[in-house]
Amino acid sequence: MMTDVFIGLGSNLKEPAAQLARAVAELASLPDCTLVAQSPFYASRPVGPQDQPDFINGAVWLKTALSPHQLLDQLQAIEQAHGRERLQHWGPRTLDLDILLFGNLTLNDERLTVPHRELANRDFALQPLLDLKPDLHMPDGKAIAELRRQCPDNRLRKLPPADYP
């Protein structure tokens, strides 16, 4: 059975837009996954320490037969291949891949929380989700569009397609 999954992408180091473009291609080639759509990319201020470059963010919509933890393992392998280092909480990174939504699943264990714990507070995740599927809802029925209207402003700026590969 294939499940609709929405993955958030972010980077603020080593050509962030190019990092995201490569990650989208790698996500599209994952086993037991099909890329449905890719959102535009957005620039925004960093969350947490402000002494770092702005982030470039986006999202992809996949259909997958993988379990949530199998998909997490694949995402972490892609992050590692991009040189991801976990040195500082909310610090700079070459690539961050987060499972935002996994079908209507709610999960909270030592490795993974779905929906993403901070989703309602991240305009740079909510807006790409709306670009992908305007009528998308959380597992509890809350509309992503309503969460976006209530979300704090992080100076989100949509990048023109010419600004990324």
Image: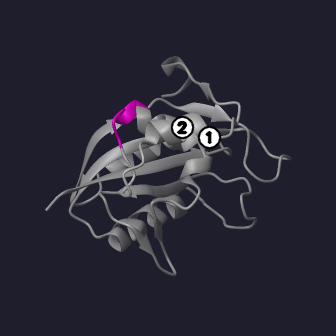
Residue at image position (52%, 27%) is 164
Residue under label 2, please give it. Answer: 148
Task: Tell me if residue 74 comes above or below residue 134 in the rendering.
Answer: below
Could you tell me how many numbered marks the image carries? 2
Residue 129, image x and y in percent? Answer: 43, 39
Residue at image position (47%, 79%) is 109
Residue 111, image x and y in percent? Answer: 50, 77
Is residue 54 something one can see in this rendering? yes
Q: Are marks 1 and 2 in contact (CB under 8 Å)?
A: yes
Residue 118, image x and y in percent? Answer: 59, 56
- Disc 1 crowd rating (10 Å Cα; few below 14, some 14-19, many 20+) is some
Residue 72, image x and y in percent? Answer: 41, 67
Q: Is mark 2 on a helix, strand or loop?
A: helix
Boundaries of the magenta span: 131-136
Task: Tell me if residue 80 comes above or below residue 132 in the rendering.
Answer: below
Residue under label 1, please give it. Answer: 151
Which quarter of the figure is the N terminus placed in? Answer: bottom left
Asked which quadrant contains residue 19, the reply is top right
Residue at image position (86%, 47%) is 51
Q: Does residue 41 show up magenta in the picture? A: no
- Disc 2 crowd rating (10 Å Cα; few below 14, some 14-19, many 20+) is many
Q: How is the image coloured?
A: one colour
Question: Most prominent secondary structure in the magenta stretch?
Answer: loop
Is residue 21 something one can see in this rendering? no
Q: What residue type is labelled 1?
A: Cys
